[in-house]
Image (tube, grey):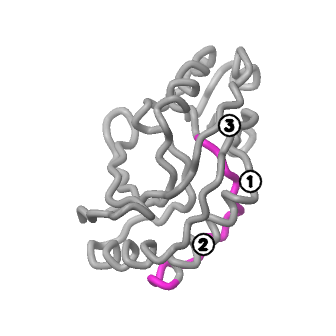
């Protein structure tokens, strides 16, 4: 199982992000079902470890807060832009949530992540995107939403990118479908 912990987004946020897509040649735009904010990528684990991870995540104390879409950005690899994204604020609240998730994952035997956490939602990926520095053509709306939990996702590679399935949500009563 290939797992990550993240935030599922409300439909209003997904709709606004979908409206910002376009104008970049060779970009593989995310679908509504693929839009999320990753708190921590875990990677491949067996079902036993997945159950341990779910149990540990169930102990994370979630303090609700209001999140807001932020500025657009990009990641590059060796000088080539390969990811377009939209930032999410407040970074402090999201960073604290990510730290709590990381602590829980450590208690389940998941090695720590060495990468710095930058709260963002990936919008597009591509190896040779043309026009990426001019994206988006219009400003991203500063929409807000209530964050009161997170989810454990399974990622499966498909012909059109990754397909995501939510295995459990917290703090709501989670029926784990491992």
Question: Measured from the top left, where is residue 113 in percent x and y?
Answer: 61, 70
Secondary structure found at label 1? helix
Disc 2 or 3, which lies upstream in sequence? Answer: 3
Q: Is residue 10 above or below residue 109?
A: above
Q: Which residue is mark 3?
A: 69
Question: Measured from the top left, where is residue 40 in percent x and y?
Answer: 55, 62
Q: Residue 116 falls in which quadrant of the image? A: bottom right
Spatial separation of the CA atoms under disc 2 and disc 3: 22 Å
Spatial separation of the CA atoms under disc 1 and disc 2: 14 Å
* Residue 118 on the magenta segment: yes
Q: Which residue is mark 2?
A: 100
Residue 126 visible? The answer is no
Where does the magenta region start and end?
A: 107-121
Q: Is residue 15 above or below residue 91?
A: above
Disc 3 or 1, which lies upstream in sequence? Answer: 3
Question: Measured from the top left, where is residue 42 in percent x and y?
Answer: 47, 66
């Amino acid at each position: 199982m290939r797992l990550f912990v993240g935030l599922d987004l409300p439909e209003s946020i997904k709709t606004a992000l979908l409206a910002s897509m376009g104008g970049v040649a060779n970009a593989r735009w995310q679908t509504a079902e693929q839009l999320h904010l990753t708190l921590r990528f875990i990677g491949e684990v067996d079902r036993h470890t997945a159950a341990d991870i779910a149990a540990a995540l169930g102990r994370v104390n979630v303090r609700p807060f209001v999140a807001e879409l932020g500025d657009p950005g990009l990641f590059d690899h060796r000088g080539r832009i390969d990811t377009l994204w939209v930032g999410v604020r407040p970074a402090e609240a999201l960073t604290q949530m990510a730290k709590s998730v990381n602590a829980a994952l450590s208690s389940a035997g998941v090695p720590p992540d060495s990468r710095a956490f930058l709260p963002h939602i990936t919008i597009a990926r591509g190896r040779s995107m043309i026009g990426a520095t001019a994206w988006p053509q219009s400003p991203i709306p500063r929409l807000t939403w209530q964050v009161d939990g997170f989810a454990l996702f399974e990622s499966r590679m498909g012909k059109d990118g990754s397909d995501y399935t939510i295995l459990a949500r917290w703090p709501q009563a989670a029926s784990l479908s491992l």
